Image: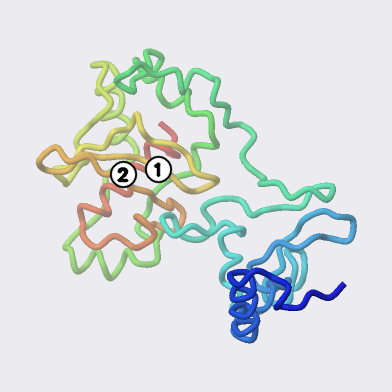
Amino acid sequence: MRLSLPALRPATAALLLGLTALAPLLPAAPTAARGFAVAGPRGGGFYHFGGGSWGGARPVGDTWRNGYEGWHPAYGPGVRPAWTNTNGNRTLDINRNVDINNNFYNRDYHGWNGAWSNGGYWGSRPWHTGWYAWTPGSWGWWGGSAAAWGLAGLATGVAITELVNQAANQQQTVFLVPGTTWRLNYGTVESVGTYGVSFSYGTDGDVTVMAAANCQLGLLNGQPPQNAAQAQLLNAACQVAYGGG
């Protein structure tokens, strides 16, 4: 049935006339374009970006996918496992040894765990450890930067181990990072994926700073250290997280 405008109330007729005039200016309905979720062949959802689905061919320069392939702006590339497809379900292949219910996370309100005394910290870490051992050739940026800073080396694993053990025996969660005026809170150290570590440290003036590192590539907050103190902090956090203890 077709309605004529004279049969409608004046206000309604004016509204319809206005919408008719605006119709050519209104945007078209959204389609399955970049960034929209669209239904799969059996009703399951997947994301369609720039002509390729999640499991399709990845165009060169399709950098948005890096976040699903082990890249993170705070840690850099390779810090965590890539997304994998298991039996059709997209799951993150994480380190199954991490268990939030074990004693490593049984900390008091100071962030300290009584099991860490007498060297107990090192055996309490629930992630893969023991692989980290800094050498002058560990990180590509080391040679030129170390020469510019006049830095011969970084604190050894033995030195960091002793600092952690001393702090734990005193029920403290911080120690002074060698070669700096900064205090690393080893009680906040957490593994991120395979090579990453998140942690906090105290700067001059008792300012607490959250930070992230990629121990394999030697990155602090996604970038190479800018000075000797940052290099020492990076190394200390990595020794605490992944060192042999």
The N terminus - image quarter: bottom right
The residue lying toward the viewer, choosing from 77 and 123, is 77
Q: Amino acid at mark 2?
A: Met
Quick check: marks 1 and 2 in contact, CB under 8 Å?
yes
Whole-percent x, y for residue 69 in the image: 61, 59
Name the N-terminal-most of marks 1 and 2: 1
Whole-percent x, y for residue 50 in the image: 68, 76
The C terminus - image quarter: top left
The residue lying toward the viewer, choosing from 154 and 47, is 47
Residue 127 location, quadrant: top right
Residue at the farthest top position? 114
Whole-percent x, y for residue 8 in the image: 69, 71
The residue that appears at 58% across and 27% down in the rendered structure is 99
Q: Is residue 243 left or right of residue 96?
A: left
- For disc 2, the marked residue is 210
The residue that appears at 21% across and 60% down in the rendered structure is 227
Residue 148 location, quadrant: bottom left
From mark 1 to mark 2, how far is it between C-alphas? 8 Å
Q: Is residue 217 above or below residue 59?
A: above
Q: Is residue 26 left or right of residue 38?
A: left
